[in-house]
Every structure is written in C-alpha cells, then in structure tokens.
C-alpha cells in the first residue's frame, strides 16, 4: 500500500509540474516573437514527453498488477523464501539462489507468462531493475497473446 501511495503522490506532483511548465510554454508562445515562440514550443516538449512517460509507466504497473492478481488467484505467486539481514535487506546469496531456480523454471517453460512473472520478481529481489522490467514486459506480452519483446 505504501508503494501505491508513493506512486500516486509522485504522479500528482509530476502532473502539477507539467501543468506549470506547460502554462509557461503557452505564455511564451502567446508573446508572439520568434524567439519566445521557439522557446515556448521547446518548453512544451518537456511536459509532453513527461506525460507520455508517466502514462506508459502507469499502464505497465496496472498490467503487472493485473497479472499478480491473476497469479494470486491461481495460487501461483512466488513465496518469499529469501533470507534477510538483521536490517531487513535481502541477503544477496539468497536472492541469487532463488534467481537460479526461477531462471531454470523459465528456461523449461519459455512460453509461460507465469514463469516470466516469477523471474521478474527474482530479478527485482536481486536488485536488477532493468532485467526485472524486461522480464515483466515479456510476461505481459505472453499473457496478452502478443509477440514478446526479444530477450536481451
């Protein structure tokens, strides 16, 4: 729940920022001189890119949560079997062991979105966010019946 609250607060702050920057871009364009119009258009590009990025991330999170709910209903969510340090951080060797198991499961069933979902969780636990995201994107594509992105 804490992650959802953080996400929504961050999104709200970004939307406020995009509106503020966008209004400044409009004001520059309304000035009408070639220089201010050019700057105004350039200023409007930043919120447009930011909105696109926020939209794509929100869609990704919603799809990943949908898969998690479906997997939970099936009883297939990965069990947290990781050892933790006294401070509560995941033990690196423990994450590596679980990752090796999840990777083997995925190699045995490369067309099953469930194995890719669990592999994404293992990558996340091993603090490899980029690969976790790619594995989750593959799980989403397989679940939706689309051609998954190439593994890299």
Image: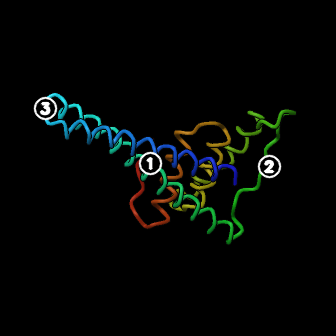
Residue farthest to the front?
31
* Viewer-side residue, 101 vs 119: 119
Under circle 3, the secondary element is: loop
Q: Quadrant of residue 38?
A: top left
Q: Earlier in the sequence, mark 1 or mark 2?
A: 1
| Mark 2–mark 3 distance (CA, rounded to whole Å) | 63 Å
Where 63 falls versus 80 (above or below)?
below
Q: Point out the image quarter for the N terminus.
A: bottom right
Could you say where residue 33 lies in the image, as x and y percent from the top left?
13, 32
Identify the residue under disc 2: 81
Residue at 35% over, 42% down = 47
Could you say where residue 17 lies in the image, as x and y percent from the top left?
44, 41
Where 107 falls versus 70 (above or below)?
above
- Give the class, few, some or many, for how many residues have Cα within 10 Å of label 1's Cα (few <14, many ≥20): some
Q: Quadrant of residue 43?
A: top left
Instruction: Using residue 17 as the reference point, say whether residue 27 is left or right of it.
Output: left
Identify the residue under disc 3: 33
Q: Earlier in the sequence, mark 1 or mark 3?
A: 3
Residue at 56% over, 54% down = 116
Residue farthest to the left?
34
Under circle 2, the secondary element is: loop
Which of label 1 and label 3 is nearer to you? 3
Q: Are dots 1 and 2 in contact, CB under 8 Å?
A: no
Instruction: Using residue 44 as the reference point, say whether residue 149 is left or right of it.
Output: right
Where 130 falls versus 150 (above or below)?
above
- Give the class, few, some or many, for how many residues have Cα within 10 Å of label 3's Cα (few <14, many ≥20): few
| Mark 1–mark 2 distance (CA, rounded to whole Å) | 33 Å
Could you say where residue 42 lies in the image, as x and y percent from the top left?
25, 34
Identify the residue under disc 1: 54
Under circle 1, the secondary element is: helix
């Amino acid at each position: 729940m804490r992650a959802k609250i953080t996400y929504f607060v961050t999104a709200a702050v970004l939307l406020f920022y995009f509106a503020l920057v966008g209004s400044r871009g409009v004001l520059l364009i309304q000035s009408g001189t070639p220089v201010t119009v050019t700057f105004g258009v350039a200023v409007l590009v930043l919120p447009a890119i930011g909105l696109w990025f926020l939209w794509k991330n929100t869609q990704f999170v919603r799809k990943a949560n949908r898969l998690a709910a479906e997997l939970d209903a099936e009883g297939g969510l990965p069990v947290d079997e990781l050892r933790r340090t006294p401070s509560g951080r995941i033990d690196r060797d423990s994450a590596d062991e679980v990752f090796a198991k999840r990777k083997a499961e995925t190699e045995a069933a490369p067309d099953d979105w469930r194995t890719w979902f669990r592999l994404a969780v293992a990558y996340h636990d091993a603090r490899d966010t980029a690969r976790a995201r790619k594995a989750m994107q593959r799980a989403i594509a397989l679940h939706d019946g689309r051609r998954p992105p190439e593994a890299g």
